[in-house]
């Protein structure tokens, strides 16, 4: 009976030492723990598009049309979809991607407006 009691006391004390405040170790390195999804890092990132299928460029350009016309907000929305890259003397834009080459904000806004308004309305899904 004394032997069983002594073995139980040794095992109990060993488990108490194992539950220290230190992180668990594998050899001399700390054990790597996987964080669950939805941590602070994921919450800090802004959501560009709703969950599910990523939106096409055409859908994102049309979403910019909901902002007031001729405002800096609408131009910033267009610039978020297609980043500006001004050229010294751009020719007439052949497509919406060419609008980024205009240096003047008013010209770039008018170019994007022209292409975004001419895109046929996409069905909402």
Image (cartoon, rainbow, N blue to C red):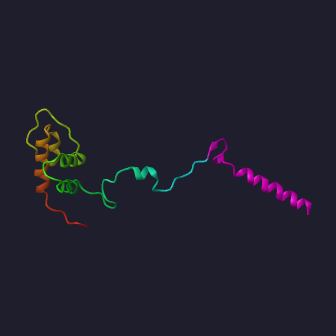
Residue 16 among magenta residues = yes
Measured as percent of width and height from the top left, residue 31 is found at 61, 47
Is 107 rendered above or below residue 11?
Answer: above
Which is more toward the observer, 93 or 46?
Answer: 46
Left or right of 3 in this view: 23: left
Single out the residue that lies furthest toward the left: 92
Residue at 23% in and 43% down: 83
Total numbered circles? 0
Residue at 22% in and 53% down: 57
Quarter the N terminus occupies:
bottom right
Is 90 rendered above or below residue 20?
Answer: above
Quarter the C terminus occupies:
bottom left
- Please identify the quarter of the rendering in which residue 7 is found: bottom right
Single out the residue that lies furthest toward the top: 88
Left or right of 54 in this view: 30: right
Left or right of 41 in this view: 72: left
Residue at 57% in and 48% down: 32
Measured as percent of width and height from the top left, residue 9 is found at 83, 56
Which is more toward the observer, 21 or 26?
Answer: 21
Residue 9 among magenta residues = yes
Measured as percent of width and height from the top left, residue 66 is found at 18, 57
What stretch of residues is rendered in magenta?
1-30
Measured as percent of width and height from the top left, residue 27 is found at 67, 43
Single out the residue that lies furthest toward the right: 2
């Amino acid at each position: 009976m004394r032997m069983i009691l002594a073995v139980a006391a040794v095992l109990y004390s060993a488990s108490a030492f194992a539950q220290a405040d230190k992180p668990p170790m594998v050899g001399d390195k700390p054990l790597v723990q996987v964080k669950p999804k939805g941590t602070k890092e994921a919450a800090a990132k802004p959501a560009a598009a709703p969950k599910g299928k990523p939106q096409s460029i055409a859908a994102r350009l049309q979403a910019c049309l909901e902002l007031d016309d001729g405002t800096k907000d609408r131009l910033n929305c267009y610039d978020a979809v297609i980043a500006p890259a001004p050229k010294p003397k751009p020719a007439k834009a052949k497509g919406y991607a060419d609008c980024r080459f205009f240096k003047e904000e008013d010209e770039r806004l008018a170019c994007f407006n022209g292409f975004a308004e001419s895109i046929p309305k996409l069905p909402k899904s």
